[in-house]
Image (tube, helix red, strand yellow):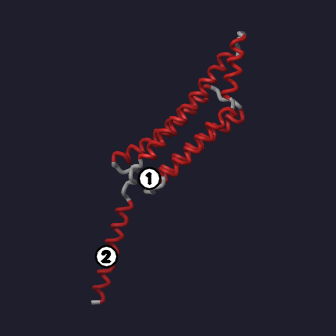
């Protein structure tokens, strides 16, 4: 009798363990706020880098000009492209990415580590661009375009994650 109770207890524990494992493997719930925050953060990043890219092209185009009107355009573009003029962009973007990371990883599952790594790499790349901008005061058009392409690819990875959640499929 004692031996039978022991087997029943073990069976109950095994069933509970299986249930716990199976429920922990479910995909996190889709979060429409995180999805919107992701979209807004990407829009903010793209807008900032497109602005810097266009200003850099204006600077590159007007640097060799002898036209007095171009000298004013050059001075205005250089001032607008300066790191000091764009500190708010970086501060706001870094804040948005931090909020995004908190929101996306608030419901942990097996994919949380990969998502956390993706958001961390995005934050690192933003900081890399910010540091270069601070040290050089302006960015070249090619660099801004390259940074935008890298950031867009990173945002795409996060968007795929959110769309996977939205469709109800499991994340990897």
| Quarter of the image with the N terminus in it | bottom left
The residue at the far bottom in this view is: 1
Q: Is residue 75 left or right of residue 3?
A: right
The residue at the far top in this view is: 67
Residue 164 place in picture, x, y as percent = 38, 45
Q: Regarding mark 1 in the picture, which secondary structure is present there?
A: loop
* Residue 91 - label: none
50 and 72: which is toward the camera: 72
* Residue 111 - label: 1
- At 67% across and 36% down in the image, what residue appears? 132
* Residue 12 - label: 2
Residue 93 place in picture, x, y as percent = 58, 40
Task: Give the answer, above or below, for where 82 lies relative to 38.
Answer: above
Q: Quadrant of residue 110?
A: bottom left
Q: Callout 1 environment at 10 Å: few (<14), some (14 to 19), or many (20+)?
A: some
21 and 99: which is toward the camera: 99
Q: Quadrant of residue 144?
A: top right
Query: Marks 2 and 1: CB-CB under 8 Å?
Result: no
- At 52% across and 49% down in the image, what residue appears? 101
How many discs mark residues in the rendered view? 2
Q: Callout 2 environment at 10 Å: few (<14), some (14 to 19), or many (20+)?
A: few
- At 35% across and 62% down in the image, what residue appears? 23
Q: Regarding mark 2 in the picture, which secondary structure is present there?
A: helix
Decide which of tag 2 and tag 1 comes sooner along the chain.
Answer: 2
48 and 150: which is toward the camera: 48
- At 46% across and 43% down in the image, what residue appears? 158
Task: Give the answer, above or below, for where 75 lies relative to 156.
Answer: above
Gap in angstroms between the C-alphas marked 2 and 1: 29 Å
Task: Give the answer, above or below, for where 10 lies relative to 81.
Answer: below
């Amino acid at each position: 009798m004692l031996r039978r109770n022991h087997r029943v207890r073990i069976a109950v524990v095994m069933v509970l363990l299986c249930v716990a494992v199976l429920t922990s493997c479910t995909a996190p719930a889709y979060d429409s706020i995180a999805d919107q925050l992701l979209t807004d953060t990407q829009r903010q990043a793209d807008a900032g880098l497109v602005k810097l890219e266009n200003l850099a092209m204006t600077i590159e185009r007007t640097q060799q000009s002898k036209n007095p009107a171009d000298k004013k355009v050059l001075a205005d573009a250089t001032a607008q492209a300066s790191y000091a003029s764009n500190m708010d962009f970086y501060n706001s973007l870094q804040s948005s990415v931090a909020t995004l990371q908190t929101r996306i990883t608030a419901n942990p599952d097996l994919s949380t580590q990969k998502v956390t790594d993706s958001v961390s790499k995005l934050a690192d790349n933003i900081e890399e661009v910010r540091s270069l901008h601070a040290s050089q005061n302006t960015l070249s058009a090619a660099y801004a375009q390259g940074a935008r392409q890298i950031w867009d690819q990173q945002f795409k990875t996060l968007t795929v994650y959110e769309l996977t959640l939205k469709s109800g499929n499991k994340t990897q």
